[in-house]
Amino acid sequence: MTLCKILVFCLFLGSLTFAQENYTEKISGIDYKLDMQLIQKGNFIMGSPKFEKGHFGDEGPQHKVEIDGFWMSRYEITWDLYNLFVTRELDANQKTKTNKSEVQLDVDAVSGATTPYVEMSFGMGIDNYPAICMTQLAAVKFCEWLSAMTGHFYRLPTEAEWEYACRAGTDSAYSFGDDSSELSEYAWYKENSQDKYQKVGTKKANPWGLFDMHGNVAEWTLDQYIPTEYSKRLEGETNPLVVGEKVYPKAVRGGSWMDNPNRLRSAARRPSSKKWKKRDPQIPKSKWWHTDAPFVGFRIVRPLETPTEEEQKKYWKYELTD
């Protein structure tokens, strides 16, 4: 092998190494850093056994799932960033697209959430606190907006990706084991939250470096919630995703500051509900906000393998009906 070929080969290896490391996304025009944690490809047993304390029927039967690699935000998305999507104050700072950009999208083409008629943190805190009360549609559109702003493709995690990342190689009820008496070291929940959400990243991380996967706020996924879905799934399926055409119910994971320990288990699932808009006085009710869900937020992922432009649109632009 000539010296020139050796150098080219080394540069190629170096680029692969760089491409598969943790990184920090910076948004132009604001001193905000979004830490992204690398989650390597692998497989795991999804769901929980019947003997697990707190087990619900929608968590079974257990089945093996294959997951491709991705990055996941180390923390839940906070108001600091989410409010910029709502106000669109930074749109003029959109990065210039090049042929190397993963996303070729004009930020002006991205639908934005309306400003809520009430302050949606309900006085629980803004600076470094998790954003809450958004609908799944709003979370999806945030991902599209962030993708346009950065040139990197972002989306919500699937249920399978979320559970894979939450478990972090474990098969216990929680990522730290089965003993819920240890939960206070890792999570904000009903017993220790003081009736409000808390700043992100103030408890211990799971084995893969992700914070607040248990508790603080529950998190949106991409999937339609179907309680019997696992019984239909093929063993060893790769990257399963239940694509739905209805707004409700969608699958929410992780449990929150309002919940008991069983809802914070790695396998616990929760369906979204129309009741989460019960107190919205608007006619029609907002498609962007849930007035009665101060326990729901989200985090984002970026797949190691960028989907095609057509595939990207499927994650952002599917039409939903009530």
Image (tube, rainbow, N blue to C red):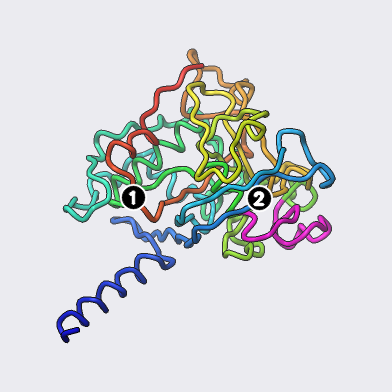
Residue 95 % position (x, y) = 23, 52
Prevailing SS of the magenta stretch: loop
Residue drawn where x is 60% and y is 59% of the image: 211
What amino acid is labelled 2 in the image? Ile
Which mark is nearer the camera, 1 or 2? 2
Q: Earlier in the sequence, mark 1 or mark 2?
A: 2
Which residues lie in the magenta part? 166-188
Q: Residues within 10 Å of mark 1 (few under 14, many from 20)?
A: some
The answer to whether one can see residue 102 in this image is yes
276 in relation to 267, above or below: above
Residue drawn where x is 36% and y is 71% of the image: 17
Residue 237 % position (x, y) = 54, 43
Picture quarter with the N terminus: bottom left
Tag count in the figure? 2
Tell me if residue 78 is in the magenta stretch. Answer: no
Residue designated by label 1:
306
233 in relation to 126, above or below: above
Numbered label attached to residue 45: 2
The answer to whether one can see residue 255 in this image is no
What amino acid is labelled 1 in the image? Thr
Residue extending farthest to the top is 283
Residue drawn where x is 57% and y is 23% of the image: 248
288 in relation to 174, above or below: above
